[in-house]
Amino acid sequence: MAVKVYSTPTCPYCVMAKKYLDSKGIPYEDIDVSRDREAAMEMIRKSGQRGVPVLDINGSIVVGFNQAEIDRLIAST
């Protein structure tokens, strides 16, 4: 399973999403879009959104901390 979390250090929902993935034992790549402009542009291309968090779970995009959608995508892998 490939999981990327596009986030910023000051975003409370980003922290919640990463803690949730940690609690499920799901490894992920944390990408700080406040420091990486190229990654920020990649996130916008994938999601159409400028807000964080954006999760890329095996190519499926989740905008915001949507626990039900995260669970659905994790279960389908």
Image (cartoon, grey):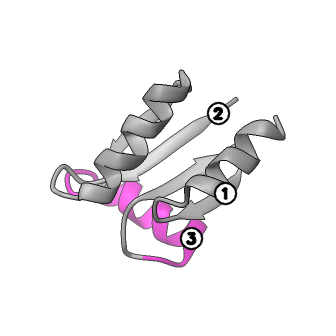
Q: Amino acid at mark 2?
A: Ala
Q: Amino acid at mark 3?
A: Ser
Position of residue 65 measured from the top left corner of the image (x, y, whole percent): 46, 59
Disc 1 designates what residue? 69
Give the magenta-colored segment's residue range.
34-49
47 in magenta = yes
Q: Which mark is residue 2?
A: 2
Q: Describe the element under mark 3 as helix, strand or loop.
A: helix
Disc 3 designates what residue? 47
Q: Amino acid at mark 1?
A: Glu
How many numbered marks does the figure carry? 3
Instruction: Tell me whether the residue at label 1 lies in contact with that at label 3, contact meaning CB atoms closer than 8 angstroms.
Output: no
Q: Is residue 65 left or right of residue 36?
A: right
Q: Which mark is residue 54?
A: none
Position of residue 9 measured from the top left corner of the image (x, y, whole percent): 18, 49
Position of residue 53 measured from the top left corner of the image (x, y, whole percent): 40, 59
Q: Is residue 39 above or below residue 25?
A: below
Point out the image quarter for the C terminus: top right
Q: Residues within 10 Å of mark 3 (few under 14, many from 20)?
A: some
**Which residue is drawn at the image coordinates 42% and 47% (left, top)?**
17
State whether the magenta stretch is mostly helix, strand or loop.
helix
Name the N-terminal-most of marks 1 and 3: 3
Q: Describe the element under mark 2 as helix, strand or loop.
A: loop
Gap between marks 2 and 1 measured at Cα? 16 Å
Q: Is residue 58 left or right of residue 7?
A: right
Confirm whether residue 9 shows in the render: yes
